[in-house]
Amino acid sequence: MSMQQLPEGPNPFLAVSRFIGNQYKDNARQLRDVHQQNNIVQALAMHTAQFESMKQQASHEARLTERGLKGQHQRAGEFLSSVHGMAQPGTQVSMKHGGISANYTVKMPSAPAAAPKPGRVPVKKNRGGKSPK
């Protein structure tokens, strides 16, 4: 048999090449499946991160809105107090803020409470403690 002549029967090189080709196809399928699984895992991770981000954004906006409404309420109360404080006794006051309106007359100031007599110092009474010596 010469070097250029192939033996009779099945070609061993063809069998090996088919085996390698089938292995390559199987490996290609496995690689494709792994790649698709990785894509799905990555998409789920991105979705989870986006959901958390949106949840935090909504929470932050809710806190800002609440803080804004609280500040608006505080400013309205301070405005009402300043108007009431600057109004002269007996003056008719009428104001409206949002859905709330108020009409009243500022009262005359009451007499100051009786001042303690000068020279008298209040004494603290013993309320069940040790008896004084």
Image: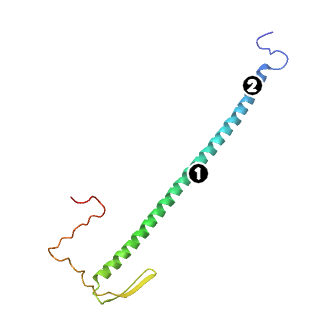
Kindly identify which residue carries mark 2: 17
Q: Which residue is drawn at 51% across and 60% down?
A: 58
Identity of the residue furthest to the top in this view: 1
Residue 128 drawn at (x, y percent): 31, 62
SS type, badge 2: helix
* Quarter-of-image position of residue 81: bottom left
Residue at image coords 77%, 27%: 18
| Depth check, front residue: 88 or 50 | 88
Per the rendering, the mark at residue 90 is: none
Task: Point out residue 111 in the picture as x, y percentages from the top left corner.
Answer: 25, 84
Q: Which of marks 2 and 1 is nearer the N terminus?
A: 2
> Where residue 47 is drawn, which disc sits there?
1
Q: Quadrant of the N terminus?
A: top right
Circle 2: residue type: Ser
| Disc 1 residue crowd, few under 14, some 14–19, many 20+, Cα 10 Å | few
Name the front one of labels 2 and 1. 1
